[in-house]
Amino acid sequence: MTRADGVVIIGAGIGGLCAAAQLAGAGVPVTVVERMATPGGKLRTVDVDGVAVDAGPTVFTARWVFDALFESLGERLDDHVTLVASERLARHAWQDGSRLDLWTDPTRSRDAIGEFAGAAEARGHDGFRAEAARIWTALEHRYMEAPVTTPVGLALRFGLGGIGEMLAINPFETLWSALGKHFKDPRLRQLYGRYATYCGASPYQATATLMLIAHLEARGVWLVEGGMHKVADAIAALAAARGAQFRYGADVREIRVTGGRASGVVLADGEHLPARDVLANCDASAIADGRFGTAAAGAVKGTAPRDRSLSALVTMMTADATGFDLDRHNVFFSNDYAREFDDIFKHGRLPAAPSVYLCAQDRGLGPPPDGPERFQIIVNAPATGDGHPPGPGEIEACQTATFAALDRCGLTLRPRSMVPVGPAMFEALFPSTGGALYGRASHGWRASFRRPGSRSGLSGLWLAGGSAHPGAGVPMAALSGRLASAAILSARASTRTFLPMATAGGISTPKATTAASA
């Protein structure tokens, strides 16, 4: 039973789960309504011939965000999820036979780059590391852990004495251009340019500010025993233990609006769940497109198709692998990186010569199994799932090109069973996105400021998830949920006391310096 003074959360993705735990821990009645059968949203698994394979995000970083969530509720993350720190960030390969591993130990990465491309490139790595760290430090507390703001508002957070630090985040240069100042070797520009794809952007159009993602990853990557979905399971259990109710297999038809305020939701079967606040943990475009009724549609602006982030052609499989010493995270680069992103963003088609990310889900925590292994393979794709998605022939051609690229890098895969998922299926799973997996593409310095914040234009309707501030990715979605829950609690406190709050929805997490610095 929902309560009229409670919160209904639409969607059990990572943002909604974090908000549910925080709100329930504060004594607020919470009901989470999720149309899928399990929590996690994009943190999900797919059955491949009787074996569960992670089908969403595979890289766990910024564990301090999740440590802070559990600690705020009197728990320890390590008591609920088994995390193993990985020394190796990823293994990278090119079709000329060259390979490069990056490590959490920056000295080890520097030495590897020096051996791979020479002393000058190792020095370039030093400069890149320093700039990425400066950008992260400048934005961590002022932007990512703080409520959404405008460019002027961000400048005010830096203050007069911090304008130089603000400009040093390099928002007006593209990532690809900035990388050219640090690396002459095109392979290293490819490698570090790939970090733009972590939030669904092209390195040729994304702001250089995104080099902070490389710094985030260099601070640590953890392997989750049992798969990434275990993180979602643990946060759902944390929320449930504090009283949150979960309704799985329940589809929301409408956000009910009464007296100019969100007042609950109506399910597909007509059931009305009243609430004082509604938190939508979905892509903001779904609201703007009227998928939750016309009354709430004007509360947010959707993302135009031209501004969407990357989608993907993701293939979950069991296969036998030979010829290449795989790690958990592996990247195989194309020979024409610029063409890859032209195909996607300019022509709206699958790349003819793709770069390939391969997650070997049975590697990293021990010796590989005898026989077939579980793999997730990702190729970047255009977000055309609601328009002209790739057809079966185009998907087959892309998969053929993918296996050929892997073979040229020395890896031979012999699939036993495969489950491909493309933009059309992602659109079905996450409506009004076209299959975009990261909300709005981070192209240009204004893009980050165009993401909606926790507060929508409709009183009582709040937002969380990868399309909202501070952005895409598991840790950012978690922060969005914490920001939204803090904003809801702040608004309720203001209503009770009739006193202005010092901050509207800010959060506090342990400083990331508790993790290994890069």
Image (cartoon, rainbow, N blue to C red):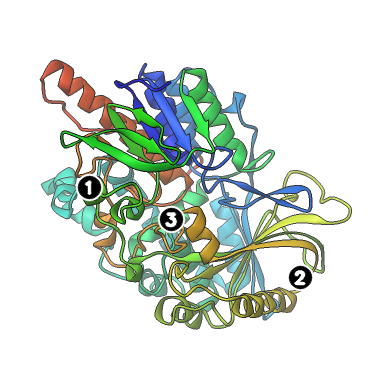
In depth, the one of 103 and 348 nearer the eye is 348
The residue nearer to you, when weighing 136 against 82, is 82
Which residue does the numbered mark 2 point to in the structure image? 411
Query: Residue at 16% of width from left, 28% of height from top?
Result: 502
Furthest-right residue in view?
A: 370
Q: What amino acid does circle 3 point to?
A: Pro
Is residue 103 left or right of 138 when viewed as pictured?
right
Is 444 positioned to the left or the right of 223 in the image?
A: left
Q: Residue 417: x and y, percent? A: 78, 61
Local secondary structure at mark 3: loop
Ranked by sequence position, the earlier of labels 1 and 2 is 1
Residue 495: quarter of image:
top left
Looking at the rendered structure, which numbered label has been put on residue 478? none
Residue 62 % position (x, y)? 48, 42
Q: Which circle's residue, 3 or 2, is located before the other in the chain?
A: 2
Residue 213: image x %, image y %? 44, 55
The label on residue 431 is: 3
Mark number, residue 299: 1
The alpha-carbon separation of the residues under discs 3 and 2 comes to: 36 Å
Which residue ends up furthest to the front in the rendered image?
A: 270
Which amino acid lies under the numbered mark 1 shown in the image of this protein? Answer: Ala
The residue carrying pointer 2 sits among few (fewer than 14), some (14 to 19) or many (20 or more) residues within 10 Å by Cα, namely: some
Residue 315 seen:
yes
At x 44%, y 81%, the residue is 342
- The residue mark sitting in front, 1 or 2, is 1
How many marks do you count on the picture?
Answer: 3
The x, y position of residue 264, in whole percent, is 31, 32
Disc 2 residue type (three-letter): Leu
| Mark-to-mark CA distance, 1 and 2 | 49 Å
